Image (tube, rainbow, N blue to C red):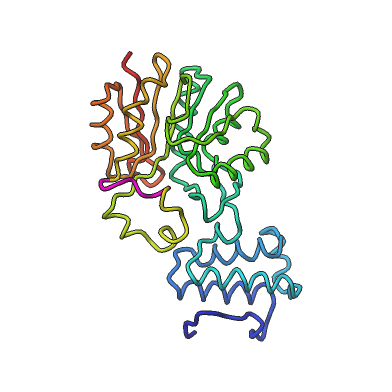
Amino acid sequence: MARRNKYDLMSLEDLSYKSIRRFLLKLFDEHGYDTPGLDAKILIMDASQLSHADLLVESSTIPETRVIKKINEYMNKRIKGEPVDKIIGYKEFYGRKYKVSKNVLSPRPDTETLVDLALDEINKSGSKTVLELGTGTGSVIISIILEKKGVIATAVDISDDALKIAKYNARVYSVSKRINFFKSSWFETVSGTYDVIISNPPYISKMEMGLLSPEVSKFDPFISLYGGEDGLAAYREIINKAGSYLNPRGVVIFEIGYLQAEAVTKLLLEGRFINISVSKDMSGNNRVIKAYKSK
């Protein structure tokens, strides 16, 4: 199949779901995508509003014209590099669907480790108040709230677009009354103290920005990715002020780049945090760091 900038499914001799799925799989594979079969299935399911089981049953069925046009639209966006979640407008995280857009960082599976560590800390210490810095889609704080009754949260972001999506996601899961969302650049407009402070801040260094795949660099916000010259700018700012916003025995929990454990540990020690520990993600990479207020 010669690579082109645009394709039309109506040119296929067989327009059944099975044939369309096979065509998309081959096309996405030729464009070098890691999961061509999964991409094809998700796009077809969303365009047709069929479940996976229904898609198997209807494999020999020819979709309605409007569905074919929708799949065609999705297909051409995908071959131009747009990620599947940005195309369909949602991403699954911690077993739930969250609205996403080009204006907000899509949640990653690795970030579920941050949720796990926060929930573990809340269960052990009985923490009741959580602050999230840089909430994005709200997927992390909403997951925590849904998993742990009795926790009250504050979540901030510098992006109005991100806050709009986070509030929408909170409404979908009926937790708006338990999360106070507002605009802030880290602690700028935050008041009060908290038992737990969590963040997945931008941590890509200047050098690493040039190595990102187009799916990330072109379709996720620069502000959500770039962490300054060495990738540590956000950690410095947060750690420098976090102690003033933590209750006694309070804890900070950050997602980190897989090579940043040593550097962030050093920053935490300089900030007089204690009992520092690093946890790995599902791929075995260092991904989350936790530390306690010293006094």
Q: Residue at x 60, y 68 (%)?
A: 74
Q: Nearer the viewer, residue 28 or 4?
A: 4
Compared across the picture, whether 155 is left or right of 274 comes to right
**Per the image, is 203 magenta?**
no
Q: Kindly give the residue lying farthest to the front in the view shown.
A: 189
> Percent from the top left, x then y, of residue 230?
25, 46
Compared across the picture, whether 246 is left or right of 167 comes to left
> Predominant secondary structure in magenta?
loop
> Percent from the top left, x then y, of residue 257?
33, 44
> Percent from the top left, x then y, of residue 182?
55, 34
Residue 91 sits above or below residue 2 on the image:
above
Q: Residue at x 40, y 23 (%)?
A: 251
Residue 285 sits above or below residue 46 on the image:
above
> Percent from the top left, x then y, of residue 169?
62, 42
Question: The C terminus appears in which quarter of the rendering?
Answer: top left
**Per the image, is 227 magenta?**
yes
Compared across the picture, whether 239 is left or right of 1 comes to left
Q: Residue at x 39, y 38 (%)?
A: 255
Location of residue 43 by image quarter: bottom right
Q: Which residues are magenta?
A: 224-230
Residue 78 sits above or below residue 244 on the image:
below
Q: Residue at x 29, y 54 (%)?
A: 208
Compared across the picture, whether 60 is left or right of 290 comes to right
